[in-house]
Image (cartoon, rainbow, N blue to C red):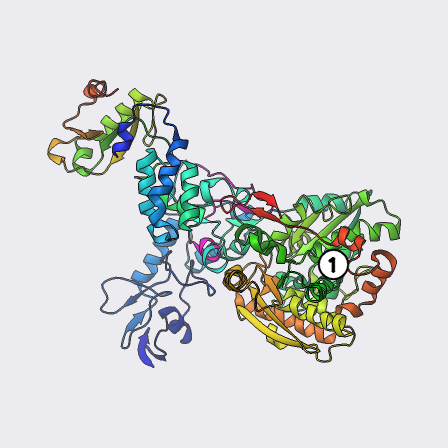
Amino acid sequence: MELEHACQCAQINEEELYPKLEELIEQHKGKPTELIMALHKAQNLFGYLPKKAQEIISERLNVPMSTVCGVISFYSFFSTVPKGRHSIRVCLGTACYVRGSQHTLERVEKELNIKVGGTTEDRRFSLDVVRCIGACGLAPAMLVDNDVYGRVKSTKIMDILKNYE
Amino acid sequence: MIRVKINNIDVEIKEGTTILEAAKKVGFNIPTLCHHPDLKPKGSCGICVVEVEGMPTLKRACMTEVVNGWKIHTNTPLVRTTRKTILELILSEHDMDCPTCIKNNKCELQSLATTLGINDLKFKKEGKEKKKIDDSSVAIVRNPNKCILCGRCVQVCEEIQTVNALTVSQRGFDTIITDAFDVGLGNSVCVNCGQCTVFCPVGALYEKSNIDKVWMAINDPDKHVVVQEAPAVRAMLGEEFGMEPGTLVVGKMYAALRRLGFDAVFDTNFTADLTILEEGTEIVTRIKEGGKLPIITSCSPGWVKFMETFFPHLGEYLSTAKSPQQMFGALSKTYYAELKGIPPEKIVSVSIMPCTAKKFECSRPEMKDSGFKDVDYVLTTREIARMMREAGIDLKEMPEESADDPMGQYTGAGTIFGATGGVMEAALRSAYFLVTGRELQDVDILAVRGMEGIKEAEIDIDGLKLKVAVAHGLGNARRLLDKVTEQLQKEGKSEYHAIEIMACPGGCVGGGGQPWGSDMARRARRGETLYKEDKTLPYRRSHENPSIKLVYERYLGKPNSEKAHHLLHTHYYKRSKIDGKVISEH
């Protein structure tokens, strides 16, 4: 996750990261059962899973391309679209949900003009939902990067987000 | 042996028997949907649930092995309601325009709804968005709106064929069966074998139809439409008209095709014999002159694309001979056109195939050696049956007729091409003659027949011990070729001289264009039919076919001549394992 935040540049030069990817997945070569670990490393490296990285993993681990795609699509942690510099995660766990986090989510979507899973055009924010972050006492809760915000009122959202450039 | 009670009836059965099999033994049919006799049971649909006394939950009959002393009930109120609810939920997600569905009256979901007495839709989903139909492939169409996510197609593509073109993607309500990157089967590693279309219980996977184009050609007075039929079609077409599996309908098939309006009715079996002369000569030359061995057959287009994608290093081992379909196409617009004085641009060459991959094969850009598209349209067995029904032709009532000259005569060696091992057997019958100048006396080479996944045989040709192997189904082909690859890498040569590969389990009689609802047992019966026909034919060796002798005399010169090479041989590509696209030429 650190790499995702370390880079302040919206235009990461992905090409330069591929030698690093090869290095990271070296130990998983020819081991189809280690697919998820390899994908995890790639996602941390790029911030998402570019098509080319998926192809390299398919080839090196000897996992069919279709299987790689299927696995990526199954787990919500994996993303095939580039992520923003800051990640917003709105909790839709039971406690948050009954305290109105759906409204928080809708407000974020409206304000940033993106849907869940999407990234703003300037790559400043990406939006995801999570199921319970263990902050039920603070419901409705929201994460921005690693910062937890509790009792989030939809009117206060833009005040919170303006702290993240 | 163990004892159980099923619906209060005592049954004694072998350990390891499933509830489904045990119930069948005492006359109770448990309904199934995702289950298929040729696939490993996985219990994804839940239709086959039954009650077992003392068990807290219902058991799935297809995958639960019976335990000694169990008291099983297959028809209780709970079982009936559960099955109905499951089916009603599946139907709530299903596109139910049955009368216009390609599977209408042959759909397993439809007949299950009848069996379970569903006469009302309890769950209705309003405003359901239609998913995109994938028609990117020249061979196979995938309609996700009909898909019930039983997973049979993924299973056959993964486990039996090891192509892995299809996968389960997304989750929950969004779950969809698709290809890598969801870009369509035409942009994937799919080899067009069409086994998914044979295993799909509903109308979610089927061949891309050429029926309209063929009707148009037939009705165009300016066109001369010729037709060829693959060996396997004569052993399966009858099933489409309610005849017993394995009924040989060759004479009736010719009659029906004439009545449909084809101008000349020929036979792919003729060019199957021609393939043997070309390929047999190639085998003998390679053995004599130290060429690449083992020589591997090239008539199965699903296999050819599979090789290009997953075994590109074996490209130069493949016979360069085209498949019988493509040899026929090239000759129809050259040899036949010249003989009859018909301009080749007026000839429309149609083929009837048990195969979906043939649609891809005829669209390959290099298949234009006649100067035109050698084969214009490929129809599967299912499609030609649809055309016959539409035209009011009942195959059963047809008289026995013969094929036309000069491309209709065939030998027993040509007809057994349709069954696994048949090409190898036919090749050996002629190779023996080509090497020794004498005829092989016992032409029945039983070791290469049958449904065993990989078969081996050794034939003594005047002291030359020819070792051959036969594989059908691409998973079996992969196993055999992994072994061959290892031998080539380690020892520089393989133990085999010649290998036959067919993409589909059972060979062409088990092709992706066969009648719906087929299983391995049915494929085997069709194969036996072809071997029976072989025995009844006046000529059983390809080189004895008078029409073949004539085509060499009149037109091609001799096997592997320059003209033969130009019209009857081809080359292969290397393809990407990511999307099946051509990377380079061999």
As displayed, is residue B530 above or below residue B514? below
Instruction: Find out whether residue A156 is within the magenta segment.
Output: no
Q: In front here: A163 or A159? A: A163
- Judging depth in this view, the residue of B44 and B307 nearest the camera is B307
> Label 1 amino acid?
Ala
Residues A71 and A4: in front is A4
Confirm whether residue B173 shows in the render: no
Q: Which residue matches tag 1?
A: B256
- At horizontal 56% and vertical 62% (from top left) the residue drawn is B492
Extreme-left residue of the structure: A137
Q: Is residue A164 above or below residue A53?
A: above
Q: In the rendering, at what x and y percent does residue B302 appear?
A: 59, 54
Q: Quadrant of residue B78?
A: bottom left
Measured as percent of width and height from the top left, residue A120 is found at: 34, 23
Report the quarter where the N terminus of chain B lies. bottom left
Horizontal side of residue A109 vs B142, given as left or right = left
> Would residue B158 be found to the left or right of residue B74 on screen?
right
Instruction: Please identify the dominant SS of the magenta region.
Output: loop
Residue at point 31% right, 42% down?
A40
Q: Residues within 10 Å of mark 1 (few under 14, many from 20)?
A: many
Residue A90 seen in the figure: yes
Q: Which residues are magenta?
A: B128-157
Residue B20: x and y, percent? 38, 68
Question: What residue is drawn where x is 74% and y is 64%?
Answer: B281
Q: Secondary structure at mark 1?
A: helix
Left or right position of B361 against B541: left
Q: Chain of mark 1?
A: B
Residue B553 sits above or below residue B329 on the image: below
Residue B148 colored in magenta in the image:
yes
